[in-house]
């Protein structure tokens, strides 16, 4: 099966393109890794063509917009035989700059796709239950712990009693001491991490609200959750590290933080100013 559908299609139609379209096609075939990070203006300059020609070119190959072309290229170039998230990367001849471009493309694609996988209704419900929570526990292991800790830091800045840990035995007593308004936010890309499932199950036994930040999949964590904030499933099963999934999780945390601050921010301005003054004292 050919994993590079768009690139193959461009190559097959090369002789039928106009002069301007051919310049764009040749640039994409030779420098496809860079295109997902470009604007139409940047591609026009690099391919020596007009922005209007780029739009026409996209329609010639069956895509409605340049944005769709960028997403399609990012998917193809990051899911080919040697991806940037698997050990097969060692078999490529990528330079540091090209790898930077590929990582940027993958992360950008992840963020773009999250706008499709995240339910607006579920997101609003998450904000409501967190704002009414007496305590918030955040739990993730491995690559899913950094977003959990980031969530703890941001909620703490908003005045919430929040705790994050990758230690199951540390989180159990914290959850046990929660009242019925308590919220447990569980992070797992696969939704199948054993410790995360066990912690979510215990939280459900305690009648606490479980928020899952996981892929849009019918996983055990997804089924256990009261609220699912879903990220796209673009990670390999066997990967060298959580890359795009971590970006998606951090993005959701940032969005929750900004949304909650928007709701209660007026009550926090004085505290934020005081905190800033205190930290600036250490810089003098």
Image (cartoon, rainbow, N blue to C red):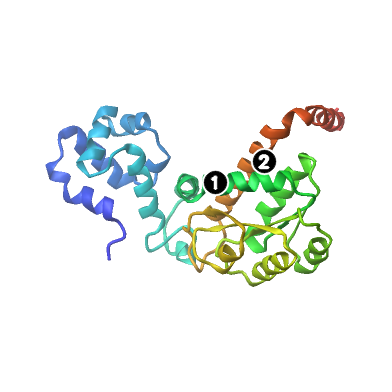
Question: Label 1 belongs to which residue?
Answer: 121
- Label 2 vs 1, first from the N-terminus: 1
Q: Nearer the viewer, mark 2 or mark 1?
A: 1
Question: Does 240 sit above or below residue 232?
Answer: below
User: Quick one: label 2, few (<14), some, or many (20+) residues within 10 Å?
Assistant: some
Res 160 seen here: yes
The foreground one among 268 and 35 is 268
Element type where label 1 sits in the image: helix
x then y, percent, for residue 274: 85, 29
The foreground one among 152 and 46 is 152
Q: Is residue 10 left or right of residue 211?
A: left
Query: Of the numbered discs in the image, which one, if any, rests on residue 30?
Result: none
Question: Does 231 sit above or below residue 202?
Answer: above
x then y, percent, for residue 26: 24, 42
Question: Label 2 belongs to which residue?
Answer: 257
Question: Does 249 sit above or below residue 266?
Answer: below
The quadrant holding residue 21 is top left
Q: Indicate the quadrant containing the C terminus: top left, top right, bottom left or bottom right.
A: top right
x then y, percent, for residue 51: 29, 28
Cα distance between the residues tagged 2 and 1: 17 Å
């Amino acid at each position: 099966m050919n994993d590079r559908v768009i690139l193959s299609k461009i190559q097959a139609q090369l002789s039928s393109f106009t002069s301007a379209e051919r310049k764009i096609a040749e640039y994409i075939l030779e420098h496809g890794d860079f295109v997902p990070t470009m604007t139409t203006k940047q591609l026009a300059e690099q391919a020596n063509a007009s922005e209007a020609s780029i739009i026409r070119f996209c329609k010639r190959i069956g895509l409605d917009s340049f944005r769709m072309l960028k997403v399609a290229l990012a998917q193809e170039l990051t899911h080919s035989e040697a991806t940037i998230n698997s050990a097969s990367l060692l078999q490529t001849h990528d330079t540091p700059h090209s790898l930077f471009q590929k990582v940027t493309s993958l992360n950008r694609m992840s963020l773009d796709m999250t706008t499709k996988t995240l339910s607006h209704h579920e997101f609003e419900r998450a904000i409501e239950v967190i704002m009414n929570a007496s305590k918030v526990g955040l739990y993730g292991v491995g690559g899913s712990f950094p977003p959990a800790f980031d969530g703890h830091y941001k909620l703490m800045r908003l005045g919430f009693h929040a705790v994050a840990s990758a230690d199951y035995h540390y989180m159990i007593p914290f959850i046990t001491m929660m009242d019925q308004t308590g919220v447990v936010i569980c992070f797992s890309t696969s939704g199948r991490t054993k410790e995360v499932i066990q912690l979510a199950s215990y939280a459900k036994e305690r009648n606490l609200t479980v928020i899952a930040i996981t892929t849009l999949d019918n996983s055990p964590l997804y089924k256990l959750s009261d609220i699912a904030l879903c990220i796209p499933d673009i990670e390999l099963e066997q990967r060298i590290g959580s890359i795009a999934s971590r970006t998606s999780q951090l993005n959701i945390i940032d969005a929750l933080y900004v949304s909650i601050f928007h709701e209660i921010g007026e009550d926090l301005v004085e505290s934020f100013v005081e905190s800033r003054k205190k930290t600036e004292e250490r810089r003098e």
